[in-house]
Each structure stands twice: as C-alpha cells, then as structure tokens.
Amino acid sequence: MPTSVDSKLATPRLTFDRMRELIGTKGVTVPPDAVAEIASEEELRWLVRDLDPGNDSIPMPPEKELHELSLTGTDFSLSSDGGIRWVDNNRDARRKLRPLVSAANRFGLEIPWHAASISEEFYRERFLHALATHGDANRIFSLLEQHQELILPSLDGRLASKLSALVDERILPFVSRFLNAGPPRVLEALCTLVARIVDDRIIPILARLLERWVTTTRRLEPKPSVDNSVPLARALEALAGHPRFEEVPNWDYQLLDLLGPKMEFFHRKDLVRIVRRSPKAYALIEALLQNARPFEHWWEDEVDVLDGAADELFARVGEGF
C-alpha cells in the first residue's frame, strides 16, 4: 500500500474519461507532470479529433446583430461573417492535453496537428516528459531522427535525467553533433544524457564535454551568474560521476589548471572533491591549504575541505596508490 508521500510523488495518470472532463470543464487545472492513459484506438481518435487546435475557439450565434469587431477578455466577435461570435473553448486545458495525448499514441495513428506543434517549446517539453514517463525508447529515437535540431538544443538537466534511463549507444551520434551547441543548460543536459553509456565510443565524447566545460568555466570565472553556475556545477557532477570519466586523457590536469585562489570557494570545492582522486593534485591542494582562511558562517569550511583532501591524498601517495 503506497504511503501518502508516495501518492504525492506518483505521476498523475489521466484516463480517457478524466481528459474528457478536463476538456469540458473550465477552471480545472491539468497537472504539469501528468501523462495520458489511452486504452483503445477509438479513444485516441476521439481525443485527436476533439483536441484539434481548430476547436480551441467555437462559433456562437450572436445575441444581437453586430457590425463591428469587439474584444472582451479571451472572447471576440466578428461582424464580417454575419455576426458570429468565436468564444474560448477551454483553450488552456486543450493546449496542455495535446502533447500528453500525442505521447500516448502507441497505436501508430497519424495525428494531424502533431508535426506543427512539435516546433513549439511548450508542446515539445511536455511531449518529451510524457514520452520518457511512458518509457518508449524507440519513439524517442524516432523523434530524434526527425527533429534532432529542435530536441537536443532545448533539453535541460531534468528532462535529460529522465531520458538517460531509456537511451543507449544510439544516442551517441546525436550528442556528437551538438557538443558545442547552446548555453550551459544544454551542456548539463548532454552530460546527463550519456551518464549510463559505457560503450568505448563514450570516451572521446566525455573528453569533448570536459573540454567544453573547462573552456566555459574559464570564460565565466571568477563569478558566473546563477543561470550559468548551477547548470555548470551539475554538468561537472554528471561528468565526474560517469563510470569511465577517469579514462579521459589528462582529465586531472585539465581540472587542476582551473584551481586557484581567484576561483570562488563554492566552485573550487566541487573541483577539489573530484581531483582528490588523482595523486597529481596533492601539491596544489597543499598550496591552496596554506592560503586558506576559515569562515565560520559557511556551512562547509574551505580549510576543512582542503585539509581532508590533502590528508587523503597524502595517505594514498604513501601507499603508492
């Protein structure tokens, strides 16, 4: 029996009847992380037809004869077609349900509005999240074949984390094409996306991702913005956590070259935790320790971090690693 916490964390599943209710009831919110559960092709056909963007507004007969254009909230009236009023038909719920329905299309049914909608960021993001939740790896790769120039540059770490559980070595050619694309958010996504791939072909890709991380960090230091520093920190965590990361040639030299007193401690400590794996880091960490000063208001003191790393490295050097 799931606990209340489990229930809160569970992905909302929208049945056919529930989606019909959401379509027909104004003011009801579609859960942001929901997925559609469609039992039959007949149900899918009904939803595809009803959720066509052309149904987002519906014509209503005029209450009185109109001879001009009038706007009121989301509703509007046109006199050019005989006074027909076009009113909102729960457009917001329909917009949120379309990507969920498309992601649940396990019947191979052609959805007329999908091809045009995939170019919209809102639709694409919700579609990919739902597709990942369904665990349909083959459809993910099929989508990449058709729209890789839209998909990969728009990824973030959260979505890439969901996709990483599904993708395999087939993702490597796609990642290779976009190694230099986008801001640090995309770099984080690419590092996360390949986190579970251990094929030999991953080594040169990890090397290029690390090279880009180092170059980007050097360009943005000493004080990158939050928008950049957070995804960069998570990108490094994903890279360094890869089981074959230490097979990247000179990975330790590249990171050691960044360490120095000008780098903010909050970023430097992340590097220290990684380079402490390498005996080459001992001398530099000892030098940094000599210049470090304790600050009691930090939840984690720089002296403690450096001292712990130096002690560990000293012991390992003495043992000959």
Image (spheres, helix red, strand yellow):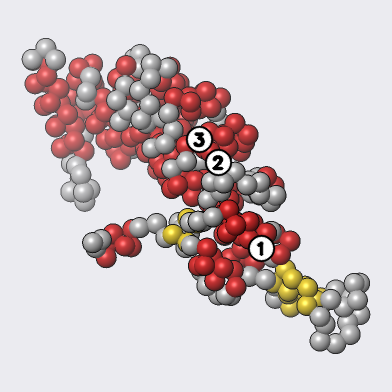
Total number of numbered discs in the rendering: 3
The quadrant of the image that shows the C terminus is: top left
Q: Please state if 91 lies on the left or on the right of 291 as rendered.
A: right
- The answer to whether residue 162 shows anywhere in this view is yes
Q: Residue at x 54, y 55 (%)?
A: 40
Q: Which residue is mark 3?
A: 138
Of the pair 45 and 307, the residue shown nearer to us: 45
**Which element carries disc 1, helix, strand or loop?**
helix
Q: Earlier in the sequence, mark 3 or mark 2?
A: 3
Amino acid at circle 1: Asp
- Residue 316 lies, in percent from the top left, at 11, 19
Q: Please state if 178 lies on the left or on the right of 318 as rendered.
A: right
Circle 3 packing at 10 Å, graded few (<14), some (14-19), many (20+), is few
Image disc number at residue 154 = 2
Quarter of the image where one finds residue 213: top left
Q: Earlier in the sequence, mark 2 or mark 1?
A: 1
Amino acid at circle 2: Ser
The quadrant of the image that shows the N terminus is: bottom left
**Which element carries disc 3, helix, strand or loop?**
helix
Quarter of the image where one finds residue 144: top right
In the figure, 38 relative to 183: above or below?
below
Between marks 2 and 1 in the image, the one whose residue lies nearer the viewer? 1
Q: Residue at x 57, y 59 (%)?
A: 43
In the figure, 244 relative to 184: above or below?
above
- The reply to whether discs 2 and 1 touch (Cβ–Cβ < 8 Å) is no
Circle 1 packing at 10 Å, graded few (<14), some (14-19), many (20+), is some
Q: Residue at x 44, y 39 (%)?
A: 163
Q: Please state if 123 lies on the left or on the right of 205 as rendered.
A: right
Image disc number at residue 50 = 1
Image disc number at residue 198 = none
User: What is the distance, in whole Å, between disc 2 and disc 1 at their CAs?
Assistant: 29 Å
